[in-house]
C-alpha cells in the first residue's frame, strides 16, 4: 500500500477543479482555476497543518529549445522522412534554437518541500528577486528518471516568451495571413499555415536545479516539443501576470483526516460540484479494492486447486487399497494383525503427504520468482518469497494422510479374509 500511495498522491489531500482529475484532461485553461474562496472554505475547517498552491499557466508560453531536443521529441510522432519539414516549419530563434512550448509551474514553499530534487539547489526559487528556474524531469512508475525528458541542465540559460497576441503565417513563406485569407484557406481545406507569436515579452532565467514533481501535482499531460519548467510562486505570478491555482495540496492532523474527508466529499458533491479532490483515504480504498480483487480471484483459484488436490489424494489412497485387497488379505492370512496393517497404511499415507510437501517446497522455490514478473505489469507489486502457505497446509495433509487410509481400510476390513481372497481371485 505504501508503494502504491507514494506513486499516487504526495499529500493527504489534493484539491482542484473537477476537470483536473478526469482521465486525459488535466489543467488546460483559466476555466479550470481553483477559486480562492474554495481554498478559504477548506482552511476554515481547521486541522490543516501545512499546505500550498501549485499555479498553472493560463495562456501559451514559448521556450527557445535546442533543435536536437525538439527533433528527439517529435520523432515519437513523425517518421524521419517528414521530420525535417516539421522542424523547418517551426519558428527559429537566435543560435538556431527552435521556438517550442513550455509547461510552467508556480510552486509555493510547501510544494517545494514535497518535490524530489535531483540535482542543484531549489532555494533560489523562493526568492522572487532572482531569475531562477528549475528544469522538471519525469520518472516512470518505477521511479526511474528519464534523462531525455528535458533539455536543460544546471547553469543553462532559459528564454521564455510570454505571448499576448497570435497570428497565422504561411508555412512556406512566413507571410502573415489576414482573417479573410485564413477563412478562404480553411474553406478550401488547406492546412499550409502555422501560428506565430506576434506580441510577446521575453525573459531569461538561469536553471538552478533539476527536479521531479509528484504526478498528483502536475498538469497530468505532456505536450510534444515542450519543456517542463518550474519557478517560485511569487515570480510566476509576477512574470506571467496570472494567479491561476491549478491545485491546492495540504496535510491534516491525524485526527482531522476523517472530518476533512467527510467535508470535502459533501462540499464537492453539493456545494461546489465544479471542484474535486483526491486523498490518501480515497487512494487507500482504491488500493484495497484492487487487492481484494486479487485475493478473491487468487483465493477462489487456490481453493479449487486445493479441493482437486485433496480429492485426488483420497482417490489415490482408495484406489491403492482396493487394488491391493488380495495382497492385504494374504498378509493378514499369514499373521499380520489389524494394528500392523493400519500402521503400514498410515505410514504410506504419511509418505505421500511428506513427498508432496517436499515437492511443493522445491517447486515454490523454483517457480515462485516467476511471480516477480507481475512487478513488470503492476509497478506497486513487490515479490517476497515465502514458504508459510506450504507449511500452513502440511498439518492438514498430515491429518488426511492418517485418516484417509484408516477410513478406507475400515470399509475393506468389514469382510472376512476368506471373502476378500475369493473376491480377489474371482
Image (spheres, grey):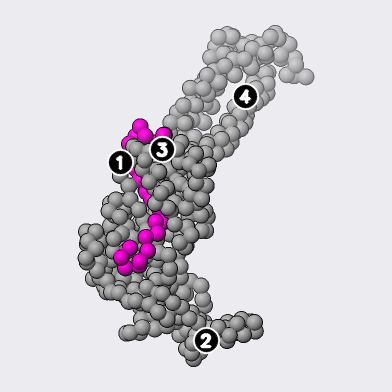
Going from N to C along the chain, the mark reached first, 4 or 3, is: 3
Give the quarter of the image for residue 121: bottom left
| Residues under numbered marks 4 and 3 in contact, where contact means CB atoms less than 8 Å apart | no
Which residue corresponds to mark 1? 49
Based on the displayed image, in which of its 4 quarters is residue 296 positioned?
Answer: top right
Q: How far apart are marks 2 and 1 (CA)?
A: 55 Å
- Which mark, by number, is residue 260? 3
In the figure, is residue 47 to the left or right of 88?
left
Q: Nearer the viewer, residue 205 or 284?
A: 205
Q: Magenta stretch: give its range.
A: 237-261
Callout 3: helix, strand or loop?
Answer: helix
Residue 177: numbered disc: 2
- Whether pointer 2 and pointer 4 mark residues with C-beta atoms closer than 8 Å, the reply is no
Residue, x 71% and y 14% (percent of image)?
A: 420
Residue 123 seen in render: yes
**Badge 4: how crowded within 10 Å, few (<14), some, or many (20+)?**
some
Marks 2 and 4, Cα distance to the nearest angstrom? 86 Å
**Rendering coords of residue 203 (x, y %):** 30, 74
- Which part of the image, by quadrant, shows the N terminus? top left
Q: Does the magenta stretch include residue 153?
A: no
Residue 95 numbered mark, or none? none
Tell me the crowding category of disc 1: few under 14, some 14 to 19, or many 20 or more residues within 10 angstroms, Cα based. Answer: few
Q: Is mark 2 on a helix, strand or loop?
A: loop
Query: Which residue is painted at 40% across and 79% down in the image?
Result: 199
Name which residue lies at 47% across and 31% down: 390
Viewer-closest of 227 and 273: 273
**Residue 77, horizontal then vertical, whole percent:** 51, 72
Label for residue 314? 4
Question: Which residue is painted at 50% across and 43% down in the image?
Answer: 271
Amino acid at each position: 500500500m505504501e508503494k502504491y500511495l507514494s506513486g499516487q498522491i504526495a499529500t493527504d489531500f489534493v484539491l482542484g477543479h473537477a476537470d483536473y482529475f478526469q482521465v486525459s484532461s488535466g489543467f488546460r485553461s483559466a476555466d479550470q482555476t481553483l477559486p480562492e474562496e474554495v481554498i478559504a472554505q477548506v482552511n476554515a475547517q481547521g486541522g490543516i497543518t501545512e499546505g500550498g498552491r501549485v499555479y498553472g499557466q493560463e495562456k501559451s508560453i514559448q521556450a527557445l529549445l535546442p533543435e536536437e531536443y525538439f527533433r528527439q521529441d517529435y520523432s515519437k510522432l513523425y517518421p524521419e522522412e517528414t521530420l525535417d519539414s516539421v522542424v523547418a516549419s517551426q519558428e527559429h530563434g537566435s543560435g538556431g534554437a527552435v521556438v517550442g512550448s513550455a509547461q510552467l509551474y508556480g510552486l509555493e514553499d510547501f510544494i517545494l518541500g514535497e518535490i524530489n530534487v535531483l540535482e542543484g539547489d531549489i532555494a533560489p526559487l523562493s526568492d522572487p528577486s532572482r531569475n531562477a528556474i528549475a528544469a522538471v524531469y519525469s520518472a516512470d512508475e518505477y521511479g526511474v528518471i528519464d534523462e531525455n525528458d528535458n533539455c536543460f541542465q544546471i547553469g543553462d540559460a532559459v528564454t521564455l516568451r510570454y505571448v499576448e497576441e497570435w497570428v497565422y503565417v504561411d508555412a512556406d513563406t512566413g507571410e502573415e495571413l489576414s482573417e479573410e485569407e485564413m477563412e478562404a484557406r480553411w474553406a478550401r481545406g488547406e492546412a499550409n499555415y502555422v501560428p506565430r507569436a506576434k506580441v510577446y515579452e521575453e525573459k531569461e532565467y538561469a536553471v538552478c536545479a533539476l527536479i521531479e514533481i509528484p504526478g498528483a501535482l502536475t498538469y497530468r499531460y505532456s505536450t510534444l516539443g515542450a519543456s517542463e519548467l518550474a519557478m517560485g510562486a511569487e515570480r510566476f505570478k509576477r512574470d506571467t501576470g496570472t494567479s491561476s491555482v491549478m491545485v491546492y495540496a495540504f496535510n491534516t492532523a491525524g485526527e482531522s483526516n476523517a472530518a476533512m474527508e467527510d467535508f470535502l466529499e459533501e462540499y464537492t458533491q453539493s456545494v461546489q460540484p465544479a471542484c474535486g479532490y483526491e486523498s490518501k483515504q480515497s487512494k487507500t480504498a482504491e488500493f484495497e479494492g484492487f487487492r481484494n480483487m486479487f485475493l478473491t480471484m487468487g483465493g477462489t483459484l487456490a481453493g479449487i486447486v486445493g479441493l482437486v488436490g485433496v480429492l485426488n489424494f483420497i482417490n489415490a489412497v482408495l484406489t491403492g487399497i482396493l487394488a491391493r485387497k488380495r495382497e492385504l488379505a494374504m498378509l493378514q492370512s499369514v499373521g499380520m494383525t489389524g494394528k500392523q496393517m493400519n500402521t503400514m497404511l498410515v505410514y504410506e499415507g504419511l509418505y505421500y503427504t511428506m513427498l508432496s510437501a517436499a515437492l511443493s517446497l522445491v517447486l515454490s522455490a523454483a517457480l515462485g520468482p516467476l511471480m516477480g514478473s507481475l512487478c513488470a505489469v503492476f509497478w506497486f507489486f513487490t515479490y517476497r518469497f515465502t514458504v508459510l502457505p506450504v507449511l500452513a497446509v502440511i498439518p492438514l495433509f498430515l491429518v488426511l494422510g492418517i485418516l484417509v487410509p484408516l477410513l478406507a481400510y475400515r470399509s475393506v476390513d468389514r469382510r472376512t479374509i476368506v471373502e476378500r481372497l475369493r473376491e480377489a481371485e474371482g
